[in-house]
Image (cartoon, helix red, strand yellow):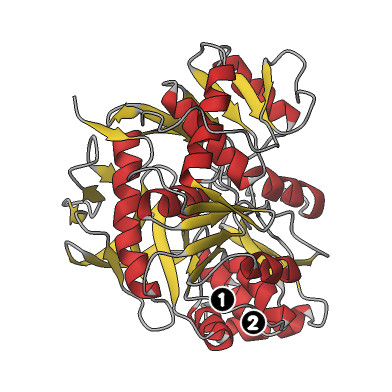
Amino acid sequence: MKTLPLLPGALTTQAIAYRQQHPVSQAEFLGDIFALAARLPQTGHVFNLCKDRYWFSVALFAAISRGMVSLLQNSTASENMTALFSDFPDAVCLGEQTTPMLAQMPYVVVPHATLPAAGTDPEMPQIPCHQQIVRIFTSGSTGKPQGHSMSFGRMHHCAIAEAERLWDVAGGPCSVLGTVSPQHMFGLEATVLLPIFGGGQFSARQPFFPADVASALAEMPEPRLLVSTPFHLRKLMDAQISLPRVSAILSATAPLSQELAQEVEAQLNAPMVEIYGSTETGALATRRPAQDAEWTTYSGIALEQDQDQQTQAHAKHFDAPQTLNDAVELLSPTRFRLQGRNSDMINIVGKRNSLAFLNQLLLNLPGVKDGVFCTHDISTADETARLAAFIVAPTRTGTDILAALRQHVDPVFLPRPLVFVESLPRDANGKLPASALAALRATHLAPRV
């Protein structure tokens, strides 16, 4: 049985994390992991609800050391938690608050004070590569959240491949700051596993406002990697504030336009990297969107297509080939262009387009702060499909927006109606859950009869 150490390398006093401006060594980190692991009851699953990225990581690795699977969900709404608890009745909830979110759910408070390491030179646990360590749920942006399990060996291998690619761009192992939640696959891989397995450090913070991003970056040594989303990066660019120097910026969760990528590189004077992946697959490839539309897979990952143009990713660390949910133009086994998500493709009177492409057009229009296209419900099978859009653009008119879109798309894809709103209910990762979009449609779009 092949195993890997819980943490890489020998225990040292070198910082592995930064909490409240103070470095935490790998030895201290392992001490906190052991201390929490000793307090966990014997069970198979835990809900990791820690918001502080350091205590989230302690809880994650404590569960791994005990052979438990961490259930990572995008929403902590009581209705969602109750539904998940019914599916995993043995689960114990881990969090920082003093009282449980649900009275019926067993709860363990994750400590806030740094605890002494468990003895001198503790023995590093060896984890089976096939051991399942997380079951992570999709964001719900395309429907009901779905769970996907990942093994320790697979996530370790992906983190090493990601470090190889990103450290090459940034010039070496980095201090990593993320505006994204570690409960999200992108946040888990890029802000926790990448620095831990890749020899970097991570910040415990998850800043949202630009000023908080600046202060969190200043707490960590160079070189620095900023992990964010197009939604957060747009806010950061609009703020026009001075930031501590970063060596690279990493983005995912939504398509990143070339215009925004170029603006980020110009303002921060650092390379902008975009990740391609999904909750189902993890990170698979990167590109430099300011320079190139083509993606390059990570080392050891190759793509192939069948006669129906369905694309699969192959790698030794995958249990089975991973089917991509995107339409792909395959240039070679390791190079490709994205044409749109399969579920995003729409057909109106025989003309095809991608909702992701239309959303990007909308977001790139001057004066548009946020926006999203959606399909309008139709009442009969022979009725022509139609698009609607919700938009945040206080300085623009509907006539302006439609005229600007008409320059780029066929008239059949123009939104009718175009609904102006004050804001869109995006989650902490900048995504718009399907339930939130459905609520917007129910509120603003009258059923077609």
Q: Nearer the viewer, residue 202 or 380?
A: 202
Q: Nearer the viewer, residue 295 or 327?
A: 295
Residue type at numbered disc 2: Leu
What residue lies at 53% left-to-right and 83% top-to-bottom? Answer: 259
Q: Quick check: marks 2 and 1 in contact, CB under 8 Å?
A: yes
* 316 w.r.t. 82: above or below: below
Q: Does residue 370 appear to the left or right of 252 in the view shown?
A: right
**Quadrant holding the N terminus:** top left
What residue lies at 71% left-to-right and 34% top-to-bottom? Answer: 96
- Residue ID for mark 2: 365
Judged from the image, the secondary structure of the residue bearing numbered disc 2 is: loop
* 27 w.r.t. 363: above or below: above
| Residue that protrudes farthest toward the front in the picture | 120
Place of residue 336 in the rendered image (x, y in percent of width and height, measured from the top left): 26, 67
Q: Does residue 296 appear to the left or right of 252 in the view shown?
A: left
Residue type at numbered disc 1: Leu
- Residue ID for mark 1: 361
